[in-house]
Image (cartoon, helix red, strand yellow):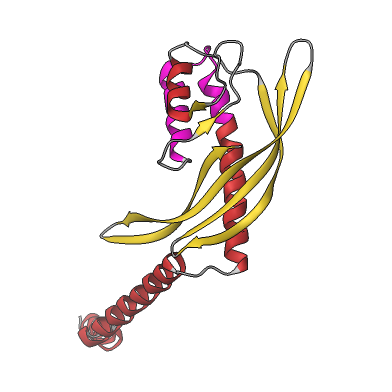
Amino acid sequence: MNRFLKISSFLLLSMVLWAPSCEDEEESARKEMALLKETREDIRQEFESEYLNEASLFAYEANAKQKLSDCFDYFTIVSDTLQSIAFRKKAGEMIVSNFISTPVYLDFIDTETIQDSAVEMRKMIKSILDNEISLSRFSADSIYVLESLQRVKTSKYAGKLGFNLIFLNTTETDNKDRAVEFYLEKEKKTFGKDTLNIWNIRLGNLL
């Protein structure tokens, strides 16, 4: 019995001696909060920076090329009548989300079904979903930066992408070198309780 009491007393004493004190826990919590605040400020400075270096601009240009490539895939889904209408509408929403908010004009629809081939993008998507117009079968190849991003305003850069637009007809394949505007602008984004003004890529008119 005495042996049991001695062992129990030893274990209890060890727990008291080795357990972190309230002060230690408070200090650890303060360090964690300071580190979290520092990390958050680093992220804020990175995304809200007014001036972007060459490496950052190059990364955003790569992002613009990927967005354009994705949009062509979305247009294929929008025009595929074998897909569900809900899936096609979602693809249409994804296209709109990648473009600037002002009216954007595109002209790669089937010119046999409409006299003016340049159509406002949102109207085009709705007309395709309503089976009022149809897209020619096409693909885009060799997307590249035609004009690098250049600062045009305090919180705005502009550039152009070039690509080869390939129309796939039953009798011939028609290739055309085309271009599309793209912009890098500050936009408000909410992250939890924080609202940051971060840079975001948007596509513009097809030229």
First to last magenta residue range = 73-97
Q: In this rendering, is residue 145 above or below 31?
A: above
Task: Inspect this view and state whether residue 146 appears.
Answer: yes
**Is 142 displayed left or right of 133 in the figure?**
right
* Coordinates of residue 115 in the picture (x, y in percent): 56, 14
Task: Name the residue nearer the viewer: 118 or 49.
Answer: 118
Q: Residue at x 28, y 81 (%)?
A: 30
Res. 108 image quadrant: top right
User: Residue furthest toward the right?
Assistant: 172
Task: Name the residue nearer the viewer: 160 or 17.
Answer: 160
**Is 60 displayed left or right of 198 in the figure?**
right
**Is 121 displayed left or right of 177 in the figure?**
left
**Is 129 displayed left or right of 108 in the figure?**
left
Chief secondary structure of the magenta portion: helix
In magenta stretch: residue 89: yes
In magenta stretch: residue 137: no
Q: Residue at x 47, y 40 (%)?
A: 99
Tell me the quadrant of the picture where the C terminus can be found: top right
* Coordinates of residue 144 in the picture (x, y in percent): 70, 47
* Coordinates of residue 134 in the picture (x, y in percent): 55, 14
Tell me the quadrant of the picture where the N terminus can be found: bottom left
* Coordinates of residue 81 in the picture (x, y in percent): 52, 12
